[in-house]
Image: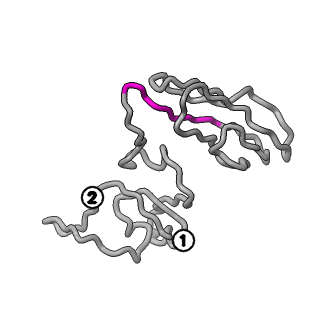
Amino acid sequence: MVARFSSSCNLIVDAGHDTSICIGGQLILQGSIIGDSAFLEWTPHDGLNDPFVLHPTATIDSAITYTLTALGFDTANHNLVVNGNFEQGNTGFYSEQTYVSDLSGMQNEMYPNGTYTLIDNPILVNDTWPNCSRSYWWGRCQYDAHQWYVNY
């Protein structure tokens, strides 16, 4: 097990002891967090009944290492927004929708309902998305920045 922590948040994160278990077995992960955490996540999510609780049940299908990550309150900076501009990618937040990434040469990654992506131009993942209204002198359509797009 691996633990990640940030000393500026006054958190102590412990993923528990390394454990051996037979393939097909189940195990309750024994993570602990000392301090006020605002968010926790076990990764990868494979085999976990809930990756966002401190003691999820893991069903082991193959060799795997789980990592426990916790975000806390930085006492020097009371900003509760983590990755608010999405420039760090698909991290620092939770969504019930399924994340999809842009695959080169495809424009239909977001056709299933219940998906989201973080991208500068949504037309790259859904060719039915309307063209943006902003145009610059070089004639290209320009979206403002990395944004969250959801297909319901």
Does the magenta stretch mainly form a helix, a strand or a loop?
strand
Residue sitting at x 86%, y 40%: 22
Is 71 on the left-hand or right-hand side of 60?
left
Residue 38 position in % (x across, y down): 52, 37
Residue 108 position in % (x across, y down): 48, 72
Identify the secondary structure beneath mark 2: loop
Q: Give the amino acid type for the residue marked by disc 1 in the picture.
A: Asn
- Residue 57: numbered disc: none
Residue 85 position in % (x across, y down): 36, 48
Identify the secondary structure beneath mark 1: loop
Give yes or no for residue 72 being in the magenta stretch.
yes
Mark 1 to mark 2: distance in Å? 24 Å
Q: Which residue in the structure is indicated by mark 1?
A: 113
Position of the N terminus, as image quadrant, is top right
- Of the residues under marks 1 and 2, which one precedes in the sequence? 1
Residue situated in front as seen by the camera: 38 or 89 = 38
The quarter of the picture where residue 20 lies is top right
Q: Residues within 10 Å of mark 2 (few under 14, many from 20)?
A: few
Residue sitting at x 57%, y 35%: 69
Is 131 on the left-hand or right-hand side of 2?
left
> Range of the magenta residues?
67-76
Residue situated in front as seen by the camera: 25 or 139 = 25
Residue situated in front as seen by the camera: 63 or 47 = 47
Residue sitting at x 79%, y 47%: 59
Residue sitting at x 72%, y 42%: 56
The quarter of the picture where residue 148 lies is bottom left
Q: Residues within 10 Å of mark 1 (few under 14, many from 20)?
A: few
Give yes or no for residue 58 being in the magenta stretch.
no
Vertical arrangement, residue 75 with respect to residue 55, above or below: above
- Residue 144: numbered disc: 2
Residue situated in front as seen by the camera: 127 or 103 = 127
